[in-house]
């Protein structure tokens, strides 16, 4: 497995959860990383991204801005998504993605995908 996501689970509204995605691609340091999510019957949607290198440049969907934080550890080839103040509408399968080659928020822009981890938020 080249990209493996961890950390999903069942939590209550208002709780926090941290997702991690470990990469085995040697280009990790020079690749953008992103998180997307998908619920049944809906298209996969952009959640957050972090630029290559030090990770100083981040971007968030409006629905998670101020509650979620993306970060990366280049030594561990891992990207994280800290999710706070979770809401039932955050329930989804969360996917990590690596190596953006087009517009940030388009799923077609990302070359590598992980298998997804399920986050369920109960009310």
Image: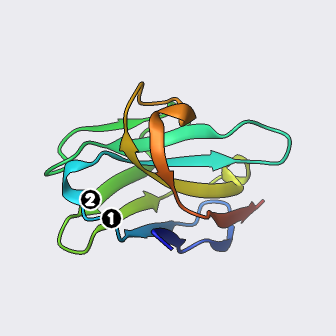
Q: Is residue 43 visible?
A: yes
Rendering coords of residue 8 (x, y %): 60, 71
Rendering coords of residue 112 (x, y %): 47, 52
Report the Cα–Cα distance between label 2 and label 1. Answer: 6 Å
Name the residue located 71 percent from the left edge and 55 percent from the top edge.
91
Name the residue located 72 percent from the left edge and 47 percent from the top edge.
89
Q: In the rendered image, which quarter is residue 32 located in? A: top left
Q: In the rendered image, which quarter is residue 66 located in? A: top left
Name the residue located 86 percent from the left edge and 41 percent from the top edge.
41
Q: Is residue 85 visible?
A: no
Say above or below: 109 vs 120: above
Left or right placement of residue 87 versus residue 80 in this view: right
Q: Which sits in the foreground, 96 or 86?
A: 96
| Element marked by disc 1 | loop
Say above or below: 70 vs 76: above
Residue tagged 2: 28
Left or right placement of residue 41 versus residue 52 in this view: right
As drawn, the residue found furthest toward the right would be 41
Residue tagged 1: 25
Q: Which sits in the foreground, 4 or 84?
A: 4
| Element marked by disc 2 | helix
As drawn, the residue found furthest toward the left would be 54
Pointers 2 and 1 in contact (CB under 8 A)? yes
Name the residue located 47 percent from the left edge and 33 percent from the top edge.
109
Rendering coords of residue 68 (x, y %): 44, 50
Numbered tag placed on residue 44 in the rendering: none
Within 10 Å of disc 2 (Cα), the crowding (few <14, some 14-19, many 20+) is many
Quarter of the picture containing the C terminus is bottom right
């Amino acid at each position: 497995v080249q990209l493996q996501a961890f950390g999903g689970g069942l939590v209550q509204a208002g709780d926090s959860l941290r997702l991690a995605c470990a990469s085995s691609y040697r280009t990790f340091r020079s690749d953008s990383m992103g998180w997307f999510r998908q619920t049944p019957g809906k298209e996969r949607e952009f959640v957050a991204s972090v630029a290559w290198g030090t990770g100083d440049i981040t971007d968030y969907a409006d629905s998670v801005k101020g509650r979620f934080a993306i970060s990366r550890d280049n030594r561990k080839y891992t990207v994280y998504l800290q999710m706070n103040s979770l809401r039932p509408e955050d329930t989804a399968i969360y996917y990590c993605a690596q190596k953006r080659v087009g517009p940030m928020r388009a799923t077609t822009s990302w070359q590598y995908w992980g298998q997804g981890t399920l986050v369920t938020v109960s009310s």
